[in-house]
Amino acid sequence: MPGRVGEQIRGRTMGYRGARFYKADLQVGTPADPIHWGDVGCRFDAAKPEASALQFVRACYEAGLEIVGITDHNFASKDYFPLLRAAARSLAGEYDHEIVLMPGFEIQADVGRGCHVLALFEPGHDLDEIDHLVTQCGIPYPRHQGGAARPSTKRLPEILEVVQRRSADGRLHGIVILPHSQSDAGIFDTDRIADWLQQAEFTNGSLFAIEVPKPPRDMSAGWQRLLRAGEDCDSGWRRQRPIACVMSSDAKAITPGTGPTNYLGARWSWIKMSEPSVEGLRQAFLDPESRIRLMGSRPEEEYLYPTITSLSVAGAGFLSDLEVDFSKNLNTLIGGGGTGKSTIIEYLRIALGQAEGVVGDAKANLERLRSTIRPDTRIAVRFQRDEKEWTVTSTGGVDPVVEAGDAVPDLRRFMPVRIYSQHEIYAIAGDREARSKLLDNLVREDLDRIDGQTEDLVAEIRQLDARIQQRPSLSSRLVGLDTEILDLTGKLERLEAAEGVLKASSALAAESAALKMAEGSIQALVAEARANVDRWSLATAGLRRDANPHPEAMEALADRLEQSLGRLREVAQQAVAAFADETRTTLESDEITELRQNHAAAKAAQDARRAELLERGIDPEAYDSYAERLRAAEESRLSISGRLAELDALGPVRSGKILALRGLWAQQSSIRAIKASELTGIVRKTATGRPFVEVDVLAFGDTDLLFDESHSWLRDRRRLTEDDMDEFVDAVINATAAGCSPTDTMVEWVGDLRAGTKPAGFPWASDARETKVLLELMDPPCLAGIELLRIPDKVTIKLYRQDGSVAGELEEGLSVGQRCTAILAVLLAQDEAPALIDQPEDDLDNEFTYRDLVPLIRQSKEQRQLVVATHDPNIPVNGDAELIVALEARNGRGSVKVMDGVDAIGALDKSSVCAAVEEIMEGSEEAFRKRFEKYGF
């Protein structure tokens, strides 16, 4: 579909100056070479050559190609190439990008009975000069004779020397590829070329690339050993560096079905470079692992992880105004001290809301760089995740706001960038808590879910504990009530001998009071029911809005609903009235009337008896008072007994919740252990195949917390000292099985001691002073708190040497460089969040950087975005950074470095970037050359 490929390219690269993948077909014939061109539907017409050129180039666009190597035999396309270039330009607007055509030729070198060779040159290379080079490569005039292309009289080393001659700036004029290497006239055509000659030509260090019929991973084991040039390759055939393998169509037609099967774009390569050039090809051929992919979809489409798209800074005190569009892979910031490398890292931290929680040296560095932010300084960051884009801005260093994109409630959590400032990796290496957090960040979503459940469960248990801890006071109150009831019962029995009648009268009075209470409750219920019915309503106002799409239907619905409500009210009011009438009839029955009369007679008799007793000197009120107090005490006792029964029932409930809490803790440990195992499985391997770094998790293994917490339980350090408590805790830990919490052992031991049993491993005698004081401290509230104390899991990291032997564990036996290397291995192993690292080489020596850090970076850069500020050339050069931003101090401010009038931003295939790397990181080309001479390499 016209424009589709162009839209993809334009969307990815607008403003971006680093390396990206280009879809390239580097061996394409044209109608200008009629001897080999086979497409009858696209022929060269001398009268109208532009028509076939336009048809040919349009087919290149339709195939989605971005780089096309025009390689007609013996440079038959010399006069046709300008027409192709003009066609590419004329169609660029239609397809939203311009195909890059690289002029070149295919010749047959004098190798055995003939070996084909491709030569490609810069898109703008002088065509007459290329034609002259064809002659220098041993192709005489006329170029074709007898209906065939004339072979070269030169051997491959001579052709390599001619084509790949360096210009004054050190760049190659052109570059050589050996086409169809495993078929007719290819380097490995044993019918035409002897083995010894194949071996000599293939191992030539000036040969960078060959063309293959399929990806090496689909070839036999023997071919794979040869092409990767590893230790398992035959020493006579092993090259100093692996050969680059590309796939090309060797097109003889523009589309399938119009002639030969090798049509435009039938096979292709994805080649990564800043822009199509010979130097871009050379860099790709020198590092095919990083820069070449064969066939398939666009490699960038696989980069689905979150990425920082760009950073722009304006109005800062130290950093000049700049805008950088980042690669999704490896970005490096290079420059001397005071050029702004760290500033860019910290500005990204601020603009992405990641400044909270920064501590130690990192915090001091952040605060120092904050001083360069003025009130009007604007830092804007674009980022992508889940195929959407956001822009956030921070003005004056304040918290960022979302300027474009959906609202983000928590930016720090939504876009979790991992930022490691100078020496922060070393700090993590020495801090167990920081290492645990490092692992937790990789499983944060799963842990957050369980953490929420854990917090809810702990809150429920604490609520249960608050209720259960009422039991001692309730039990004490129950004993007091039993005593009071016994006392009051005795007093009443003594009064009853003289005042027996009062007891009966008191009972009748209580019955009369109960009857009155029933009557009052009926009246209150009827009044409440009538009031409630009057308040019933339906939410129908929204149905009566004129703005409703169906107002008439909605209005009718509201009427019907309110009519139904009216009928409900009527029925309810009738039911309430019926209830009132029925209960009134019941209360006015003959039986109840007679009962009321009995109550009145009893009261009159009681009043007479009271008067008589008073005349005899007996206080009738004492009996009533004692009886009321007894009744109240018995009611309280009944209530407290019920509450105690409820609390007793809470014990099993609490035990169940404790078990559930232990289950959640086990899930947390399991999640960490699984992730640790995954990390161990994916980190770089040693020469023996053992993981370079082994990460493990010991459930409840970080017991320092238990020692610290136990000291807070001490009330009188003269009776039980911190050393005593440490002895007890140490014994508990030693007696706890692996994977279990020592707090469970501690609670179990206290229970055994209270039951008179001394646990195995307990450090003191059962009747020792320390034991008695310990049991005083370990009261129920303390034990309840211990059961809820989560002992952290312990993350252990072990580093292995290349021979598979153990170098040591992070906490002992490793040098600073080894420890930091181990942490970096974990940092870069598996996490899709962008990682921003400021000068990781500070805590590593050069050997570790080259041997360990660079492979880690290369392994990680297509699994997550990396931004590394560095002054070590190993990282941008051997790490093959897709984007290098060179910085310099200019007029007292950090600025993008300018080389020969060009900003030094891009990959190493850009001359300005290469020159900046040489000057900044090698001390200039001359300094590098002199060191090279002194080493004697």
Image (tube, rainbow, N blue to C red):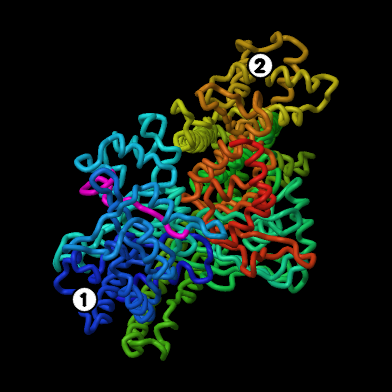
Residue 443 sits above or below residue 648 on the image: below
Q: Which mark is residue 566?
A: none
x then y, percent, for residue 517? 56, 57
- Side of 914 where 99 appears, left or right: left
User: Would you say the magenta stretch is mainly helix, strand or loop?
Assistant: loop
What's the residue at 31%, 43% (across, down)?
A: 216
Q: Which mark is residue 44?
A: 1
Magenta highlight range: 173-187
**Residue ranking furthest to the right:** 718
Element marked by disc 2: helix
- Tell me, yes or no, if residue 664 can be seen here: no
- Side of 187 where 447 appears, left or right: right
What's the residue at 55%, 39% (across, down)?
A: 826
x then y, percent, for residue 458? 58, 41
Q: Nearer the viewer, residue 645 or 309?
A: 309
Q: Residues within 10 Å of mark 2 (few under 14, many from 20)?
A: some
